[in-house]
Amino acid sequence: MPSSLVTGRLRSLAHLGPALRKLASQLESLGLGLSLWEPPDVPVAGGAGGCALCPLLEGGRGECRRAIREFAGGVLAESTPRKARAPYGCWMIGIPIFRRRRLVGAATACFPVRDMIEEESLARLCERLHLDRQAVQDAAAGAVRYNAEHADDLLEVLQHLLEGQQELQIAQGELGILSSNLASTYEELSLMYRISGSMKLTRSPRDFLQAVCDELLEVASVEGMLAMSYPDPRTGGEGMILQAGSIAVDAVAARRLVEEQVRPAVSAQGQVVVENRFAPTPGGALAPAVRNWVAAPMTAEDKPIGVLVALNKARGDFDSVDMKLLGSIASQAAVFVTNHRLYQDVQDLLMGVLHALTASIDAKDPYTSGHSHRVAMISQKLAETMGFDAHRVRRMYLTGLLHDVGKIGVPESILCKPGRLTDEEYESIKKHPAIGAKILADIHHLDDVLEGILCHHERPDGRGYPRGLTGADVPLEGLIVGLADSFDAMTSDRTYRAGLSVETALGEIRKYAGVQFDPAVVQAFLSLDLEALKADITRAGNGLSPGLAQERRA
């Protein structure tokens, strides 16, 4: 009986293809051929004859084929294992095949036995079939392995082998599903970890949400991602929409999709919404780019603050796994956006207090009005020019803004004195960097600006104060603020003199490079576009110093 299976003909047994192929191979090693049948008695693979005797005995007469078909029909009808003698003395064994307790087919095999080729039996068989006795004996020599008594044992072997292959295939299928699920879970956990690790309050919501969209593209296997944050009702700020992926939807169409269809659906249900049969307006901007989507709300204190939308599943429809993943990421994104807004509120409050503090100090002397603001702007621009990162640039702005906060401890009679100061008065003035650092020392948020405030009057030549540091011992932040402070002071009017022109001030800065000012900071300052700097200072408010307002850089 041929051991190869014609799997293309399997219908009810198609799910067992791999298991049946292995079963056929195992039976072949036992000298048995496998035939498969589907109800009522339709052969789908194999056939009569499993050894060299089969074609010799059958000889085209069809008796064995008819007998095996009838035998298989009996196995299918009774749904129980059976054995029976074949027309030429071989034995047939068969077992029903079940799937989830439903009969789906039968497996049969036949084998010759030794009593068939005993001298008298063989003579009668050859005479009946008109066969050459020697040819039959030669064929039987390598084909006959069993006695009739082995039929029960072989029937049990057939059943155990089939059950074992079925169980193995089920286990392999479950293992494949488990492996796939584990791989997906690993990717999702990795994504969650990466997103959690990137939730830094110093990062903008735009950058964060864009990164979330980019990450979800691959993990969720989608063509496009949208993230929309709704306007903040407390500040009146505008909402934003971000995109990622290759889907052909422009920003206007994406916003319409979210506002007109996604947001109402999500708001109505208050949970993740999936639309696998999306039908955009015919001829509209979205047709036929979007075919399905899943959307998850970003909520804070039960109030919607945005939505994440995945567009066009790469294969098939969006399912519960996609909904769960997007919902989890949306929850994390909502936490970040909410915390960032709270952080921004605290930042705005702090900056408001600091601006009010520095403005009150500047107000002590009408000639220094806006000085702290201008020093902050110049320090920030210098930091950018010297390649500081964005966070350090922002800290340089604060350092410049607060550099003179210690003057709150200097008597107004000294700060506003017309004419030059006495040595004693000058010593009092020299205390303001240390006073400022001490005032701000208990504000943890300002720890990294204290050195710049304390050292903004230190000089490379060691003649600065309060510590008389020299060369590389002077913090770079102090050197930057010191140059910005000196430039604004030179170009501002004083009670005892008019402000210098920008050209004159620049000449002084060049002259004292390496002495009062750090050469690298001087080089960066001389490369600045002062017209652009003036525009930045004016936009930010508090006005320009007279010299900067009236002069152009030579």
Image: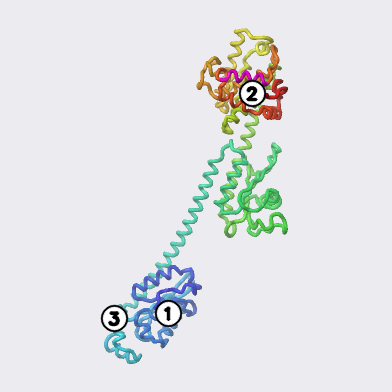
Closer to the chain start, of discs 2 and 1, is 1
**Label 2, residues with CA under 10 Å away: few <14, some 14-19, many ≥20:** many
User: Looking at the image, which residue is at 53% across and 46% down?
Assistant: 192
Above or below, 126 against 236 in this view is below
> Magenta segment, which residues?
502-513
> In this view of the protein, which residue sits in the foreground, 507 or 491?
507
**What type of secondary structure mainly makes up the magenta span?**
helix
**Label 3, residues with CA under 10 Å away: few <14, some 14-19, many ≥20:** few
> In this view of the protein, which residue sits in the foreground, 259 or 273?
259
Q: Which residue is disc 2 drawn over?
A: 375
Per the image, label 2 sits on a secondary structure element best described as: helix
Per the image, label 3 sits on a secondary structure element best described as: helix
Q: Amino acid at mark 2?
A: Val
Number of callouts: 3
Q: Which mark is residue 141?
A: 3
Quadrant where the C terminus sits is: top right
Q: Position of residue 51 (x, y in %)?
A: 35, 79
Q: Amino acid at mark 1?
A: Gly
